[in-house]
Image (spheres, rainbow, N blue to C red):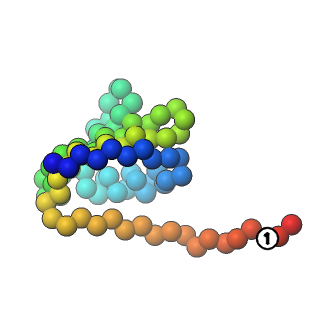
Amino acid sequence: MTRVHQLAGATGSTALDAAYYASIAQTDESCDGTVRHRLRPEIGDGTIEVTSLRSGFHIVRYDVTFVGGHQVGYTFPAWTPPSPP
């Protein structure tokens, strides 16, 4: 297993994260505020835990082994600079 701990800020997309986790894992919500994503057997073994803090940050703990190569892709919307005042 590979254990990785990450502190993620509020700038990420919760919808993108949820879609990603749903595509690779079964989600278990607990009453302690931590959401556990257990990898599907065809994807690998282990759990990704996400704990939301009051400050808007999230602690993400990866304790997983993927079956094969694993690649995550994101699409970012085009950025338009603000108009001058």
Is residue 60 visible in the rendered image? The answer is yes
User: Label 1's element?
Assistant: loop
Q: Is residue 26 in view from this perspective?
A: no
- How many residues crowd mark 1 within 10 Å: few (<14), some (14–19), many (20+)? few
* Depicted 50 relative to depicted 20: above or below: above
- Which residue is at the front of the view, 17 or 63? 63
Q: Residue furthest right?
A: 85
Q: Which residue is at a point 13% across and 60% down the rendered structure image? A: 67
**Number of residue marks:** 1
Q: Residue at x 40, y 53 (%)?
A: 17
Q: Position of residue 5 (x, y in %)?
A: 33, 44
Amino acid type at circle 1 is Ser
- What residue is at 45 percent from the left and 47 percent from the top? 8
Task: Report whether 61 appears left or right of 63.
Answer: right
- Going by the image, does 54 lie left or right of 69? right
**In the image, what residue occupies the spot 54% across and 35% down?**
55
- The residue under label 1 is 83
Relative image position of residue 58 (x, y in whole percent): 44, 41
Query: Measured along the vertical axis of the image, is residue 9 above or below residue 35?
Result: below
Q: Position of residue 23 (x, y in %)?
A: 29, 57
Task: Give the camera-side residue of 47 and 29.
Answer: 47
Locate the C terminus and report the quarter of the image it occupies: bottom right
